[in-house]
Image (spheres, rainbow, N blue to C red):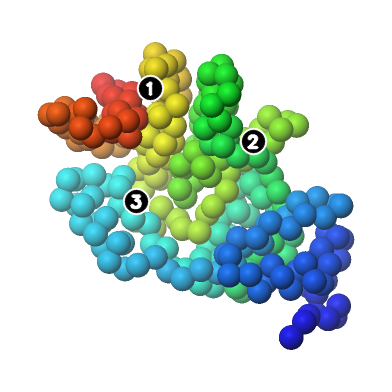
Amino acid sequence: MEMNFAQLPNELLTTGINVRQWQAAMDSPQRIEKLTTKQGIYWLKKAAPARGIFRYHALNFFAWALRLPLLKAAPHPGGETAIAVELKRLQSLYEAGALVPRVVAHRSDWMLVEHVGESIVKTMKQADTPQATRQQLFALCLKALKQLHRQDLCLSQGFVRNLLIDPVSRRIAFVDFEDNPLAVMSLPEAQARDLLLLATSTARFFVDDVAFFEQQIKTFLTGHDPQMVAALKITTDRLQWLTRIPFQGFFGHDYQKLKVGILALKGL
């Protein structure tokens, strides 16, 4: 049944989103929908099922067996609980001055946020992107992450896909906060995990630019919390075996990308 105007959430009246547009987004099987109006771009994020419990326990067993606490899986409750977690985390990050999406409206099973930036990983992937641009973006990501850490905060999933850039201000924005690593690890461990995920997810763009990549990470770690550096060192030291496995050529380019990320964190 089509939504009538009275059913359109009051908070949306200034966004330019119309009833049909909203109804289509709500009815779509896609969990995240982009809505574009004359007033701007918005993203509708709907509640999703919890991650498979087997996957959660398998990752935690792997982290326990290899003594890698940073790889423990943060609980992902899914559904309305995940929406509530993300709303709370976005509020705390916003209050600390981090660039995160502004929540326009929300209910227990959805939230609508403003567009906050463009995809960094998409730019890095493009074949015609100059390496100097990739370098600049990576440096900006590390700078923004360090500023966030100085506020005693951490990300949820620190992969580069969850970092965006505002094309006007050139500030880095953070998205995707459906889980909270602090539920299963300390703040220094969560911050070390941020860098580990960011480094390993961007290493593929610096396979032939290792010196710059390593120098940027060293700059990031300079003056950082010693407990965070220690937590990172424990994990990366225990991951070094991955860089020494035999017949590396058989594992292809993806292995080389991972190897660059792990080696960049060696000898902290």
- Dot 1: what SS? loop
- Whether 155 is drawn above or below 180: the answer is above
Mark 3 or 1, closer to the camera: 1
Please report the residue visible at 49 percent of the width from the left and 46 percent of the height from the top.
155
* Residue in view at x 69 percent, y 67 percent: 25
Kind of residue sitting beneath label 1:
Val
Badge 3 amino acid: Met
Q: Which residue is mark 3?
A: 185
Pick out the residue farthest to the left.
246
Q: Which residue is mark 1?
A: 207
Pointer 1 and pointer 2: residues touching (CB < 8 Å)?
A: no
| Front position among marks 1 and 2 | 1
Instruction: Where is residue 151? Give x, y as percent.
Output: 54, 39
What distance separates the C-alpha of mark 3 from that of mark 2?
A: 28 Å
Q: Residue furthest top?
A: 211
Q: Which residue is mark 2?
A: 165
The residue positioned 75% from the left and 31% from the top of the image is 168
In the picture, measured across the screen, residue 92 lies left or right of residue 78, that is: right
